Amino acid sequence: MGRIFGSLSAGAARPDQAELAAVSARQRHGGPDEHQVLRGPGWSLGCDRLAVTDPLGGRQPYRLGHLPGVTAVLDGEIYNHAELRRELAARGHRFPDLCDGTLLPALYAEYGTGFARRLDGMFAVAVLDVRASPRLVLAADPMGLKPLHYHQGADGAFRFASEIPALLAFDGVRTAPRADSLDTVLALRTPISARTALEGISVLPPGATAVVRPGRPAALRRRPPGQDGPERPRPATADVLRREVRRLARADVPVCVLTSGGLASGLVTALAAEYAREDGAPAPHTFHLTHRGRRPDPEAAQARAAARHARTVHHEVALDPAELGSLLTRTVRHLGQPSADPAAPGTYALFRAVRQAGYSVALTGDGADELFGASARIRPAGPAPFVADWAAAYTDGLAAAPRLLREYLYTPAYRDFIAEEGSAADRVERELRSAGGDRLTAITAFETRWRLPGRLRRTDHLGMASAVEARMPFCRPAVAEHARSLAPRRLQDRRALAEAGRELLPGAVLKRPGRPFALPVTAMLVPGGPLLEPVRELLSAERLARAGQVRPDRVRTLFARQLERPSDHDALALWALATHELWSEVVRGMHVPVDCAA
């Protein structure tokens, strides 16, 4: 586990050591336990390690004495490493320790660029092979749980890093915000495709492998799914989830659970506690985020009920509104991309508290809504009432500002630019309409292929900001495949999850859907509210006029309406505009040394 980075070029010079140290420093918060960089003619490979598996072994970058010329780095966890180690040992490979990533050079030696198909886990891997013609092979796990950002310059030099701020510390990486980044944030809340909000910087798609040779464009391909086994009776949802929770709850360091008080995180809590009791281990600790001064808080009561029922040691993390200004800046900096999701600052604060309590691994309920179709976003997919333009209705449900409001806010020049280039919302609608099949299938496929990986990257960045590895049982391939197999599926059909929790959770949790660790933005954007002045400053007329994308007078009107009659829709639009403005300001400083410490 940790953060990784590296480069490959056609030149013979060794990359500058000070430059690589600057790259490492930008993401060291995610790998505080060990730092190592190797470099040679035209290449570099480095890692900032978070020691989770075999903490005393597993020195990165990984090299094996009997395989000179093959070097690997890993961000993530390989859950089938013991099985793979036995298989590779039978073929004559030798390993100095029991760390999961140590076997990567041997696995690559046996299977070449197809090695990632043998991995079961969450991972971003880079393998450098300089035995003949140098090449760099990058691979991402099938769900996109671990991010890998890359840039290929005009000179052909290829550079990559786990985090965007680290990538921008390479001398050869120069970029600027994409002109359509504001529209993307207002339309989708955050970039969700392989294209980031910065020119020339991409993220490796889920399940993809990239092969890079010096001076040539990266050859990118998505790996085909694994071979299906013989058809078997469909297992119960609880049994599938139980198996994966137990697998992810095993670690060489203590593991805790994050709970929102909802059904998905409640299931993970109950199954983790069940496993601990059967294993004779102490009761797990659970963590829930709340906000000082916000009453009542039904989610906190539900989280306490789930923890009490599972007999965990429960902690409530109270977010201080006075901290929101600095918290928002840190969150934006760690994400590297703009995000209008109000859950982001709370997620950062929760992971920070988990680390302060001594944990570096946390189980979460992320992915349940997208995979089990339990989100209100999919309402347009329902058979009745029949929504005529269901793709547009669904896309507006993703938005921080619906289409009509966006067009009202944009300057004439920016509105014309988006009309000519095409909005992010337009691209989503085209994909949905061209998917074929029924509405629910099209929306679920889009959610799992694009929207979910974007959200998982947010969780990863905000967890690793405090050196906490987030493990997500609902995002395991077996659980995702089980979710796809459930048919017929109806709108907001939570029956499979509710049935799984019937014997595990109290009734209050079963009957009420969970909510994210989100800031109550509407309640905080009111006269005297803690967000009012920070947002007002970010949306000053001078700032907005300088950017030239939205009309200051219409933003002022939106602000006045929010102060007179607070609403979730107006508050979210103002929040999105403010977070994009803050990101634009922060990203301008990323080309110079920036303190990214948590």
Image (tube, helix red, strand yellow):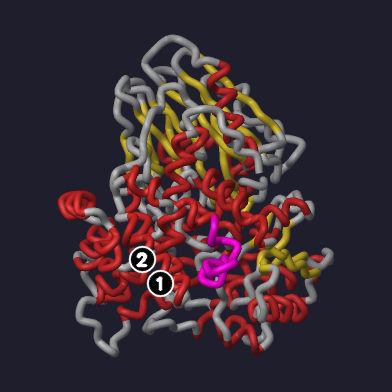
**167 or 281: nearer the viewer:** 167
Q: Nearer the viewer, residue 93 or 15?
A: 15
Is 343 situated left or right of 444 in this image? right
> Does the image show residue 483?
no
| Numbered circle sitting on residue 244 | none
Relative to 540, does residue 34 appear above or below in the rendering? above
Q: Residue at x 72, y 81 (%)?
A: 305
Check residue 557 in the rendering and tell me which mark sits there, or answer none.
Answer: 2
As displayed, is residue 389 above or below residue 318? below
How many numbered discs sit on the rendered protein?
2
Circle 1: element type: helix
On the question of residue 58 being in view, the answer is yes
Classify residue 136 by image quadrant: top left
Inspect the image, locate mark 2, and give the three-letter code of the amino acid beneath it. Answer: Thr
Where disc 2 sits, the SS reads: helix
Task: Look at the image and tell me in which quarter the N terminus lies.
Answer: top right
Point 58% across, 74% down: residue: 264
Quadrant for the C terminus in the image: top right
Residue 532 lies in magenta, yes or no?
yes
- Give whichever of 284, 463 is nearer the camera: 463
Vertical arrangement, residue 438 with respect to residue 426, above or below = below
Residue drawn at x 35%, y 59% is 186
Q: Residue furthest top?
A: 12
Judge left or right: residue 410 versus residue 369: left
Residue 502, relative to residue 175: is it above or below?
Answer: below
> Which residue range is magenta in the image?
518-533
In the image, what residue type sits under mark 1? Arg
Residue found 78% across the figure and 55% down from its top: 357
User: Residue 166: horizontal and vertical position, in percent?
Assistant: 52, 33
Q: Give residue 561's mark.
A: 1
